């Protein structure tokens, strides 16, 4: 009976409960209309869009962007390690199908941007502010679609917020052609250029007219190269038949023209220049170049767009400072030393005495064996050095600022990189083994007794370089980064003037149009900043070599190989190479010799045609045409 | 209480029984195999097992039209022992032969399907020998299309699957001309200067290949030869 009475109470309870419970607004979140009614809210929203921007910075690698939240442990893998710039100390991974995807995140950013674009006309802000918002949102959308186009080719162009009204089919937008997609990105750049101001009043790191021009030059060069060189890697399939991937060769001219015009506008504006453009010596050039990346804020004349890493912590710091120190300066971090610049990159740097060409490192007096990677040969007459960095003497200053060379000083320590020794009897003991005594002195295989005292070739912990040099660019010599996640706070230069000059030079030489002398000047200005005194002519080889060395490790090489369709030629069952320093005990006092050889424990890598496009995720539900061979 | 104790297991048992419909879908019950044959000479057309010619097939009766692929062994044969009996549209693609039309094939039980193709190039009169410290290959090329020959190569590997994609040492040469059927091409690999990959006394497989200049074309080969160095 009691139970019955309780049941009677239920309707009363129900009637009480039916307030607006389900319609209540959360107290800890801003509602859309409130957010945009307040200029501060718009700013907040904009900050979030910038955060999502696919900037290929310190926190970008094959699995995505902003890899500095949650678990940021990526083993120290960097995009450079799937190119000829570097290898990882341990991992031999090349490019997998799931790598370098950016689909869901891309369309999320585009949707978030479209929400803003749709709402701009309704905002009660001044005309100038409206213009800036229009420009910024176009810039962000251009940046996002650029990231999509270079991965997938033609993609669905969604330019306003889609609303679900019960019909899923109506939300499905087919892919546009690759041509339409690139044209759309360039058009968005133009909208940004027309609406953005030349600077922000407080010097904020937000898009300006010049950043938009810079983006446009990068985009146009990318598209132009695809059009010009697409035929180097022909593919077939439905996506090709429908022109969803691939550009006609005839499109190259207009894109190169757009690249020339955009970069020329930046150059002629007089707003930008190279940081310390005429050093007195290569040593000075090396120091200037190193500082430029240690803190790009010292060079605001050169840096066009910066992404800041403001304070240590998840989402705000990054991990270059722990992963890439030489082993000797690990500062307590258990796995340093993971970026190993290759000999293939080292070879590309010019010398000062014989400029204008790559200068492969000669290890023997004969100098006729640069393609011999078979290891030590007792019959060869190796060049001997007291100072192991001596072999790099005369090489471009930027090599010295990009890599920690054996025997050079870093953070007050002499960095020891040694692969072993040649015993007095002429036999080689490489990559380990017991110490030996010769000429009354004990010699250790890796150059020192304790594993904290050297930085090369010991496999322990995957902490020692296996290419013969360690990594330096971007690392801060004066700061000891705490051994924890996201503790590095150096800023990333996303666009700098040197890249604009190189885009200009490349577009001129590739299209055979524009002012050739100006293009040559752009190229040689950058070389002059690196301590070169002899000008070289504007040729495509000179420009590409200059890109490799000037922009090394700025995550450009991957896309350069993609857009110029050179990946499959460079990586066709290909191994990468090391220059190993070896102590030669056949002479007294012992001296260093160097051996060119393939990198230990690294498998050959091959890039397949189909990899020029990533697969489109979720074709089963989104109904899109898949890219060839996926 | 006792009753409940009894009910619960019975109830669970009933649930278990009705939950599991017996999976009576058939397993793949057919086999498809065959060989790429030179339409003129009726000899097998040598292939690459990775990054070589592929066979695309679409199973009928499904809306998705998903392409599945098979790869081909070096000797030009292929075999799929786990395929459903059904009708398929089968097309060899991205190969070392003149593209062929898709064909509808009914696969049932043990089904043989050979592809008669026109290889782009026939690598003929091949001699691969050790001469002194070198491995020397001589051969002739007979091309069946008017395109240029892009490249010729001599490839070495410890495994018989040797080819352009699977090799530790190569000697190749860009040709970029239409080949002369009477010309004897020669390629050589110097053993001492590849001492880290070619060790004296060991056996290696050597194979000669040539690549036509056509979109997505693959190498044509002669049979691999085993040599003791």
Image (spheres, coloured by chain):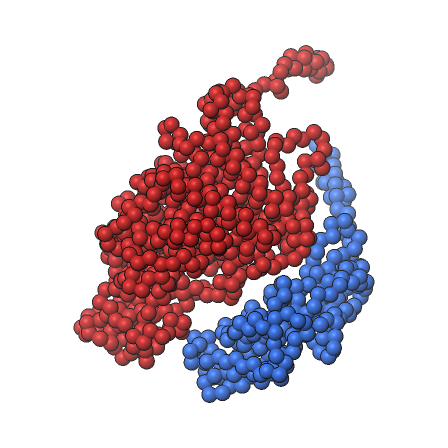
In the rendered image, which quarter contains the C terminus of chain A? bottom right
Foreground: B153 or A413?
B153
Left or right side of A21 for A507: left
State the residue at coordinates (27%, 75%).
A423
Q: Residue furthest left?
A: A440
**Residue B53 in the image: x percent, y percent?**
65, 66
**Residue A544 in the image: x percent, y percent?**
43, 57
**Residue B200 in the image: x percent, y percent?**
45, 82
Left or right side of A277 for A63: right
Q: How many marks?
A: 0
State the residue at coordinates (36%, 75%).
A368
Q: Residue A594: which quarter of the image?
A: bottom left
Q: In the rendered image, is residue A450 in sight?
A: no
Vertical placement of A32 versus B72: above or below? Answer: above
Which chain is rendered blue in the image?
B
State the residue at coordinates (31%, 64%).
A354
Left or right side of A239 for B195: left
Chain A colour in the picture: red
State the residue at coordinates (67%, 55%).
A237
**Residue A150 in the image: x percent, y percent?**
54, 48
Foreground: B194 or A549?
A549
Foreground: A253 or A590?
A253
In the rendered image, which quarter contains the N terminus of chain A? top right
Q: In the rendered image, is residue A511 in sight?
A: yes
């Amino acid at each position: 009976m009691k139970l019955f009475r309780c049941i009677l109470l239920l309707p009363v309870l129900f009637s009480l409960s039916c307030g607006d419970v389900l319609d209540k607004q959360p107290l800890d979140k801003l509602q859309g209309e409130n957010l945009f009614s307040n200029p501060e809210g718009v700013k907040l929203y904009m900050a979030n869009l910038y955060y999502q921007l696919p900037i290929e910075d310190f926190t970008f690698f094959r699995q995505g962007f902003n890899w500095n939240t949650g678990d940021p442990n990526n083993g120290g893998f960097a995009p450079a390690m799937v190119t000829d710039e570097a290898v990882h100390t341990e991992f031999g991974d090349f490019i997998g199908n799931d790598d370098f995807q950016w689909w869901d995140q891309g369309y999320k950013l585009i949707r978030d941007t479209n929400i803003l674009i749709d709402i701009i006309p309704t905002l009660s802000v001044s005309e100038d502010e409206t213009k800036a918002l229009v420009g910024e949102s176009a810039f962000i959308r251009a940046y996002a679609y650029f990231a999509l186009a270079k991965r997938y080719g033609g993609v669905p162009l969604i330019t306003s917020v889609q609303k679900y009204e019960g019909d899923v089919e109506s939300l499905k937008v087919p892919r546009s052609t690759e041509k339409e997609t690139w044209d759309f990105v360039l058009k968005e750049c133009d909208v940004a250029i027309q609406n953005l101001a030349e600077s922000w009043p407080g010097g904020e790191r937000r898009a300006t007219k010049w950043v938009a021009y810079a983006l446009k030059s990068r985009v146009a060069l990318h598209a132009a190269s695809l059009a010009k060189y697409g035929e180097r890697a022909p593919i077939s399939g439905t996506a090709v038949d429908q022109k969803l991937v691939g550009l006609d060769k005839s499109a190259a001219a207009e894109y190169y023209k757009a690249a020339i015009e955009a970069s020329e506008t930046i150059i002629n504006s007089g707003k930008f220049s190279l940081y310390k453009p005429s050093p007195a010596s290569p040593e000075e050039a090396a120091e200037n170049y190193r500082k430029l990346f240690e803190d790009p804020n010292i060079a605001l004349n050169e840096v066009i767009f910066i992404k800041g890493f403001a304070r240590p912590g998840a989402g705000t710091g990054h991990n270059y400072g722990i992963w890439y120190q030489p082993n000797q300066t690990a500062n307590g971090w258990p796995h340093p030393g993971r970026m190993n610049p290759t000999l293939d990159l080292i070879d590309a740097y010019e010398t000062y005495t014989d400029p204008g060409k790559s200068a492969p490192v000669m290890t023997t007096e004969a100098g006729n064996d640069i393609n011999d990677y078979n290891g030590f040969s007792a019959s060869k007459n190796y060049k001997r050095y007291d100072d192991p960095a001596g072999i790099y003497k005369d090489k471009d200053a930027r090599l010295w600022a990009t890599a920690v060379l054996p025997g050079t000083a870093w953070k007050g320590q002499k960095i020891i990189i040694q692969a072993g020794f040649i015993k007095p009897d002429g036999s080689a003991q490489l990559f380990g083994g017991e110490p030996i005594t010769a000429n009354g002195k004990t010699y250790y295989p890796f150059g020192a007794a304790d594993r904290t005292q050297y930085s090369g070739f010991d496999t322990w912990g995957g902490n020692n370089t296996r290419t013969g040099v360690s990594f330096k660019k971007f690392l801060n010599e004066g700061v000891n980064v705490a051994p924890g996640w996201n503790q590095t706070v150096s800023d990333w230069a996303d666009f700098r003037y040197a890249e604009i000059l190189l885009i200009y030079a490349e577009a001129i030489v590739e299209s055979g149009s524009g002012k050739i002398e100006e293009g040559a000047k752009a190229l040689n200005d950058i070389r002059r900043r690196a301590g070169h005194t002899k000008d070289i002519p504007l040729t495509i080889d000179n420009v590409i070599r200059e890109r490799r060395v000037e922009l090394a490790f700025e995550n450009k090489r991957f896309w350069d190989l993609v857009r110029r369709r050179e990946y499959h030629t460079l990586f066709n069952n290909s191994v990468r190479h090391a220059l190993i320093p070896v102590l030669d005990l056949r002479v007294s006092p012992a001296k260093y010799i160097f051996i060119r050889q393939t990198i230990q424990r690294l498998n050959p890598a091959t890039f397949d045609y189909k990899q020029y496009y990533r697969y489109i995720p979720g074709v089963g539900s989104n109904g899109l045409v898949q890219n060839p061979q996926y | 209480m006792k009753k409940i104790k009894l009910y619960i297991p019975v109830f669970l048992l009933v649930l278990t029984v009705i939950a599991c419909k017996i999976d009576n879908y058939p397993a793949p019950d057919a086999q498809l195999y065959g060989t790429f044959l030179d339409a003129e000479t009726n000899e097998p057309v040598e292939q690459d097992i990775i990054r070589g010619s592929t066979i695309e097939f679409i199973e009928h009766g499904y809306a998705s039209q998903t392409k599945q692929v098979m790869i081909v062994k070096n000797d030009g044969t292929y075999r799929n022992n786990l395929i459903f009996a059904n009708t398929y549209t089968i097309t060899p693609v991205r190969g070392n032969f003149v593209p062929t039309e898709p064909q509808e094939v009914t696969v049932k039980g043990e089904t043989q399907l050979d592809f008669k193709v026109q290889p782009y190039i026939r690598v003929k009169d091949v001699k691969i020998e050790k001469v002194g410290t070198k491995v020397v290959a001589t051969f002739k090329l007979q091309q069946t299309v008017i395109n240029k020959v892009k490249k010729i190569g001599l490839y070495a590997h410890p495994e018989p699957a040797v080819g352009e994609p699977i090799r530790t040492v190569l000697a190749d040469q860009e040709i970029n001309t239409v080949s002369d059927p009477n010309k004897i091409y020669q390629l050589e690999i110097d053993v001492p200067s590849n001492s880290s990959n070619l060790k004296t006394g060991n056996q290696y497989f050597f194979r000669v290949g040539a690549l036509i200049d056509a979109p997505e074309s693959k190498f044509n080969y002669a049979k691999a030869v085993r040599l003791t160095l």
